Image: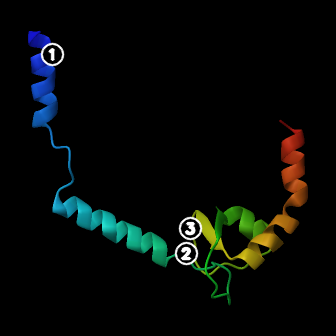
Amino acid sequence: MILIIILVSSVLSKKSFYSPADAASMIAREKAANESKICGVEGCTKSGERSVSSKQAEKAGFSLKAEGRRVHLCKDHYKQFKKATKRDRELELLGR
């Protein structure tokens, strides 16, 4: 019985909500994530629908605006990406 009271009091004493500073930083990260979702291919200004590895995008023949691990592609460029990497994806599935 005493153990249950100690557990309940320890749970209630911990913060179970975000402080305003945490909320502000979460909102800032969310805004940054939403703003950067523009197609990463040079000359394209459409909104990014999917993100893929930047290495794979370069292998598919795209010239990218910025460097990073991942790049967002618009619907049209993602379709071109899928066509360009179809053989690689099929070989990868067969190797499993």
Q: Which mark is residue 4?
A: 1
Identity of the residue furthest to the front in this view: 1
Q: Which mark is residue 37?
A: 2
Q: Amino acid at mark 2?
A: Lys
User: Which label sits in the foreground, 2 or 3?
Assistant: 2
Q: Residues within 10 Å of mark 2 (few under 14, many from 20)?
A: some
Task: Kindly check if marks 2 and 3 are in contact, taking CB atoms under 8 A apart as contact.
Answer: no
Residue 11 is at least partly visible in this image = yes
Q: CA distance from mark 2 to mark 1?
A: 49 Å
Residue depicted at x 77% and y 78%: 76
| Secondary structure type for disc 1 | helix
Q: How many marks?
A: 3
Identity of the residue furthest to the top in this view: 1
Residue depicted at x 8% and y 11%: 2
Write down the quadrant of residue 43 in the picture: bottom right
Would residue 28 appear left or right of 19 to someone viewing this image?
right
Q: CA distance from mark 2 to mark 3?
A: 13 Å
Viewer-nearest residue: 67 or 21: 21
**Is 86 above or below relative to 8?**
below
Q: Earlier in the sequence, mark 3 or mark 1?
A: 1
Write down the quadrant of residue 16 in the picture: top left
Residue depicted at x 40% and y 68%: 30
Would residue 33 appear left or right of 9 to someone viewing this image?
right
Please name the residue that numbered disc 3 is placed on. Answer: 68
Q: Amino acid at mark 3?
A: Gly
Write down the quadrant of residue 53 in the picture: bottom right
